Amino acid sequence: MSVRRATRTHNGKTREYWLVDIVYRHANGNETRVRRAPRLQTRRDAEALERELLRELQETDKIKVVKLAPTFCEFAESFMFEHVKVNKQSAQGSHARVFVSQLRGGPTSQRGNRR
C-alpha cells in the first residue's frame, strides 16, 4: 500500500504526516514516482488522493503539475501592470521605485532607510 505515515524532524521537533507514495509503471516500461501529502491529514483523505493520482496516471500517463507561486520579479511585473496603473502618476512612480530597489536589494529611498 502506498499510503503511510511519515516522520520528519525539523529544529528538534518531530512531526508525523500522511504521505502518498506511488511508483507507477507505464505501458512502455518506464516508471514514474509520485509523492504527495494530502491537504487534510487524515488516512481517508490520503487514500482518496492515492485513488485520484492512480486514475489520473492511468488515463493520461502524466500528473497535472501544480502551478508554483510567482517569484517576486514576476509578481512585481503583474502587480504594476494590473493594479498600479489605475493609481495617480505619483503613486505609480513610488511603487516602481520601491519594486526596483527591492529587486536590486538597495535602500527604498534616495535619503537612506527611514525608521
Image: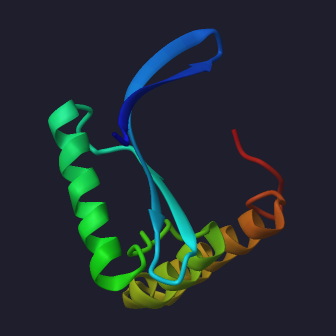
**Residue 62 at x, y percent in the picture:** 42, 78
Residue pictured at 54% horizontal, 74% vertical: 75
- Pick the quarter of the image with the C terminus: top right
Residue 24 versus residue 113: which sits nearer the camera?
A: 24
Which residue is pictured at 46% across the width and 76% down the height? 26
Expressed as whole percent of the image width and height from the top left, the position of residue 36 reads 42, 50
Front-most of residues 9 and 80: 9
Q: Is residue 112 shown left or right of residue 74?
A: right
> Where is 15 relative to 19, above or below?
above
Q: State whether residue 63 is above or below residue 51.
A: below
Seen in the image, is 73 located left or right of residue 83?
A: right
On the image, which quarter does residue 41 sit in?
top left
Q: Position of residue 46 (x, y in %)?
A: 25, 42
User: Looking at the image, which residue sits at the far top?
Assistant: 12
User: Residue 47, image x and y in percent?
Assistant: 22, 44
Q: Is residue 37 left or right of residue 76?
A: left
**Residue at (72% x, 45% y) in the render:** 114
* Quadrant of res 100: bottom right
Toward the viewer: 31 or 40?
31
User: Which quadrant: the N terminus?
Assistant: top left
Q: Residue at x 54, y 71 (%)?
A: 70
Residue 16 versus residue 103 in the image, above or below: above
Describe residue 53's horizontal placement relative to residue 24 as left or right: left
